[in-house]
């Protein structure tokens, strides 16, 4: 049952569930242990089934549940060296780290995982691709601008989770502090809707089956604005929300079957 499901995507917490044939992994753990458990129950999964947590970077909305989860469950954390050092310094609980090298693919059950460097104001942040057979999932959020590294890594994906964080006009018009506006619009911040479209245009091939847009700002974006920026891409586009799990996205069936939920 290869596929994935977002438990929630945004500034209040991020977590994606990756399903292998006989394995389940989390990408990030940005919700409390209790909320993570509750969200997993909604998709028929328990923390006891999780075989590892892959961490993209050390920001709170990606790691806030990590310490309490590993305190009660012996789940290894997959992270690069610098992120692992930061997590080690932040947590009182000692974890079992499995260190990967940014830019170097590694095996994870049936998946070939490629962690690649992205520009963001964190310690050595990464995005991931997961390949198996003819399928390839790319998860790329919290990226300040589109880089050649990201474009190369995301080539030939069949499934994509891309950041579509903000509408630039809404950022400028918002009541957010100037320091926030400067950060989110910087090259170490987040992708706008238009930048997300530019990234999609740069990596889209006829192998691409669907795109899920994530990490939308609740104040400085709107699903309609994000979808409008994707008009004409000729591929299924969906929004990942902050307030609950997405449907299950199968990576086994044909393109048409992606429109059906398994939960």
Image: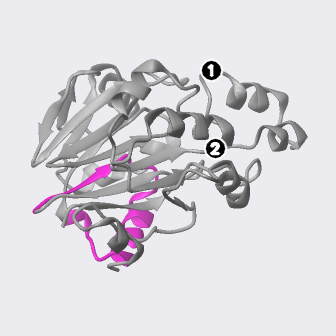
> How far from the left and from the top, in percent, is residue 100?
21, 26
Left or right: 177, with 217 as reference point: right
Number of labelled discs?
A: 2
Q: Which quadrant would the C terminus be assigned to in this image?
A: bottom left
Instruction: Please determine whether, in this image, residue 162 is positioned above or below residue 118.
Output: below
Q: Observer-nearest residue: 79 or 115?
A: 115
Left or right: 182, with 204 as reference point: right
Which residue position holds label 2? Answer: 165
> How far from the left and from the top, in percent, is residue 53?
27, 46
Stretch in magenta: 22-48
Q: In percent of the image, x 58 and y 52: which residue is there?
A: 12
Which residue position holds label 1? Answer: 187
Instruction: Please determine whether, in this image, residue 146 is positioned above or below residue 238.
Output: above
At mark 1, the secondary structure is loop
> How far from the left and from the top, in percent, is residue 60?
51, 40
> How far from the left and from the top, in percent, is residue 241?
56, 62
Location of residue 128 by image quarter: top left
Label 2 and label 1: CA atoms lie apart by 13 Å
Q: Is residue 8 visible?
A: yes
Q: In percent of the image, x 35 and y 34: which residue is there?
A: 155
């Amino acid at each position: 049952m290869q596929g994935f499901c977002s438990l929630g995507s945004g500034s209040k917490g991020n977590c994606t569930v990756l399903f292998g044939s006989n394995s389940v992994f989390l990408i990030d753990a940005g919700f409390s242990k209790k909320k993570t458990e509750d969200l997993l129950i909604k998709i028929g999964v328990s923390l006891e089934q999780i075989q590892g947590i892959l961490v993209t970077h050390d920001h709170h909305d990606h790691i806030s549940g990590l310490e309490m989860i590993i305190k009660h469950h012996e789940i290894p954390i997959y992270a690069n060296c610098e992120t692992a050092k930061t997590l080690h310094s932040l947590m009182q609980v000692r974890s079992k780290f499995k260190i990967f090298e940014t830019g170097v693919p590694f095996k994870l059950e049936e998946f070939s995982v490629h962690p690649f460097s992205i520009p963001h104001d964190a310690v050595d942040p990464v995005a991931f691709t997961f390949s198996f057979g003819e399928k390839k999932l790319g998860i790329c959020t919290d990226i300040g601008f589109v880089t050649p590294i990201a474009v190369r890594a995301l080539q030939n994906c069949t499934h994509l989770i891309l950041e579509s964080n903000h509408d630039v006009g809404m950022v400028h018009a918002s009541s957010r502090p100037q320091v926030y506006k400067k950060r989110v619009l910087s090259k170490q911040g987040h992708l706008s809707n238009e930048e997300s479209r530019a990234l999609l245009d740069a990596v889209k091939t006829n192998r691409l089956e669907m795109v899920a847009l994530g990490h939308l700002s609740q104040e400085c974006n709107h699903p309609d604005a994000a979808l409008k920026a994707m008009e004409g891409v000729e591929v299924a586009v969906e929004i990942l929300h902050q307030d609950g799990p997405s449907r299950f996205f199968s990576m086994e069936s044909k393109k048409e079957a992606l429109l059906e939920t398994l939960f």
